[in-house]
Image: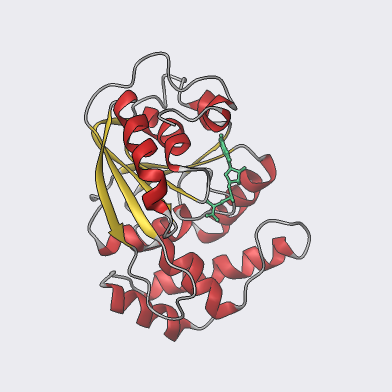
Amino acid sequence: MNRERLANGLTQMGVAFDAEALDRFEAFHAILDAYNARMDLTAVLDEDERIDRHDLDSAAPLAHGLIAPEAKIIDVGTGAGFPGMPLLILRPDLRMTFLDALQKRIAFLQDALAKLGLRAETLHARAEDAARMAAHREAYDVAVSRAVAGAATLQELTLPFVRQGGVSIAWKGPGVAQELTAGRRAAFVLGGTVRGVVDAPVPGRRDWAHVLLVTDKTGKTPAAYPRRAGTPGKKPLGT
Ligand code: SAM
């Protein structure tokens, strides 16, 4: 792994890190490679691209001070651990839950967490089902999600997890403007208020760009939400 690229990128973003974090990123990449050789876990990227697109991109909320110390946080649709794993590597104080509907990805994350010596909860479930469980409903300070669904669907998959006063952070592409009206309406139904969009300030090659859609949890999510598994995707609120 190109430690210098990662260290320089984090420094340019204003994100704090130490040598142990760089060691863990290096170990995490090696574990990902080992799994990817056996199963289709995530798109294989060249090393520099992986640092930019996965590690630095995942760290974006830290550049904006969006995640408080020891926050309880859930990564909804984490896949191979993005953005949750880089966030946890950089901030081992976070109380992280990794959620995904695919068991093979959760099994990978459990193995990776053990090998990296990091503590976190893993949850194999659909977000629509998990958000109805008492232990998870409105139980988190922060929900994060990247590349999971359109903004309106995403609000229904994340806001029910967030306590009043907490926040949902979604990584979106430059086309977010087209999703914003529905995203705002959906948030309103679910007890959320869209705060706005902030840039994900990743240095390096930029033939792609992300922004963070930040939604505050300003009220309680009505008991009817989230709707049955699959419905938020098929019939997004607010569209
Ligand atoms: N967040 C990761 C990233 O940015 O690399 C993975 C993105 S991948 C395109 C989408 C992931 O979301 C998949 O792992 C999928 O299993 C998961 N997912 C989609 N809908 C979900 C749902 N309703 N509940 C739980 N996981 C879901």
Relative to 196, say whether 210 is above or below. below
Q: Of 221 and 237, which appears nearest the observer?
A: 237
Which quarter of the image is occupied by the N terminus?
A: bottom right
Report x, y in % for residue 142.
32, 41
Front-most of 138 and 202? 202
Q: How many marks?
A: 0
Q: Is 109 left or right of 25, judged from the image as shown? A: right
Quadrant location of ligand 1? top right
Q: Position of residue 4 (x, y in %)?
A: 43, 86
Q: Which residue lies furthest to the right in this view?
A: 38
Instruction: Between residue 221 and residue 130, name the one nearer to us.
Output: 221
How is colour applied across the structure in the image? secondary structure
* Relative height, residue 135 to residue 54 (above, below): above
Residue positioned 33% across, 21% down in the render = 221
Counting from the top left corner in percent of width and height, residue 237 is at 44, 28
**Above-or-below relation of 83 to 194:** below
Q: Can residue 92 be seen in this view?
A: no
Quarter that holds the C terminus? top left
Name the residue rendered at 29%, 28% in the picture.
Answer: 188
Please report the residue visible at 42 percent of the width from the left and 81 percent of the height from the top. 204
Can residue 27 be seen in the rendering of this structure? yes
Residue 184 falls in which quadrant of the image?
top left
Looking at the image, is 34 positioned above or below residue 107? Answer: below
Residue 11 in picture, x, y percent from top left: 30, 78
